[in-house]
Image (spheres, rainbow, N blue to C red):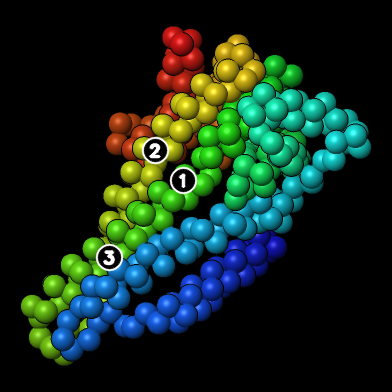
Amino acid sequence: MIKRVFLFIVTNLAVMITISIVLNILGVQPYLSRQGINYNSLMVFCLVWGFGGALISLAMSRVSAKWMMGVKVLQAGSAGQHEGLVQMVHNLARGAGLSTMPEVGVYESPEVNAFATGPTKNRSLVAFSSGLLKTMGPKEIEGVAAHEVAHIQNGDMVTMTLLQGVVNAFVMFFARVIAFTISRNVREESQAMVQFMTVLALDILLGILGSMVVMWFSRHREFKADAGAATLAGSNSMIAALQGLQRLYGRGADAEQHASLSTMKISGKQGRFGGLFSSHPPLEERIARLQRA
């Protein structure tokens, strides 16, 4: 836990320092002056901060996953009991037309989980929790692996990063423009505080609205990854994987333990509004789509 917190802090400091250096190199001037807003400076400021953090996080994603999750990368030919897992992922990757095989890793966790990460298709990682490998059968694991390989094939990591960058930039831009407009209508001695508080509030409010857009796209890409997995491994394997997660979720006592699966996600029974902030569609809907295909 301490290691994860330390790495989180170091990563964010690296992001802030890097973006500050980029802004200095670009010669971006403060966007606020006595004359008002310099929209060109504000636009560059928001684009650099909006995309900078997302792109740096993407570039570090594979390394960060290994450090923070304790992922042990398996080497083909020397993976021991997991040799079959490495060969399975690589066979699926070849079927997906990937020219460079993704790294395959395992990490210790009771959660039934798997994820794909990496800055590019040629520098990707597919990792499985020990809980998933112990709980699921070979056919179900193949479905999970195919789903993760489909994410890599579709370039979902890059696409999600770019979308998040766009949303970040828009949120920052409009929050500051609106806050500046509001602050002009109060007493001069209160303007700085009003503007600061308004920017803070709008960053949160617009960020929440923006996250709905990001989560909508995330649900869309999950359906696409399910379809890709059905092509790579067969619809029966993908359906078996989702049904396996349904069984785990339906155990009652285990439901809370498995309530946050970051890729094959189960987020509990949600109302219509709560579903707007879910990164993954309901399992029932995902299974139904595959069965109709």
Q: Nearer the viewer, residue 44 or 66?
A: 44
Q: Is residue 23 above or below residue 273?
A: below
Q: Position of residue 25 (x, y in %)?
A: 47, 80
CA distance for labels 2 and 1: 8 Å
Picture quarter containing residue 28? Answer: bottom left
Q: Residues within 10 Å of mark 3 (few under 14, many from 20)?
A: many
Q: In the image, is 37 to the left or to the right of 87?
A: left
Find out whether the residues at labels 2 and 1 contact each other: C-beta distance under 8 Å: yes
Q: Tell me the kind of residue under disc 3.
A: Phe
Q: Secondary structure at mark 1?
A: helix
Q: Which mark is residue 160?
A: 1
Which residue bears the numbered disc 3?
173
Q: Is residue 252 visible?
A: no
Q: Secondary structure at mark 2?
A: helix
Which residue bears the numbered disc 2?
217
Which residue is drawn at the image coordinates 20% and 69% (left, top)?
177
Name the quarter where the N terminus is drawn: bottom right
Q: Tell me the kind of residue under disc 2.
A: Phe
Q: In the image, is 206 to the left or to the right of 286?
A: left
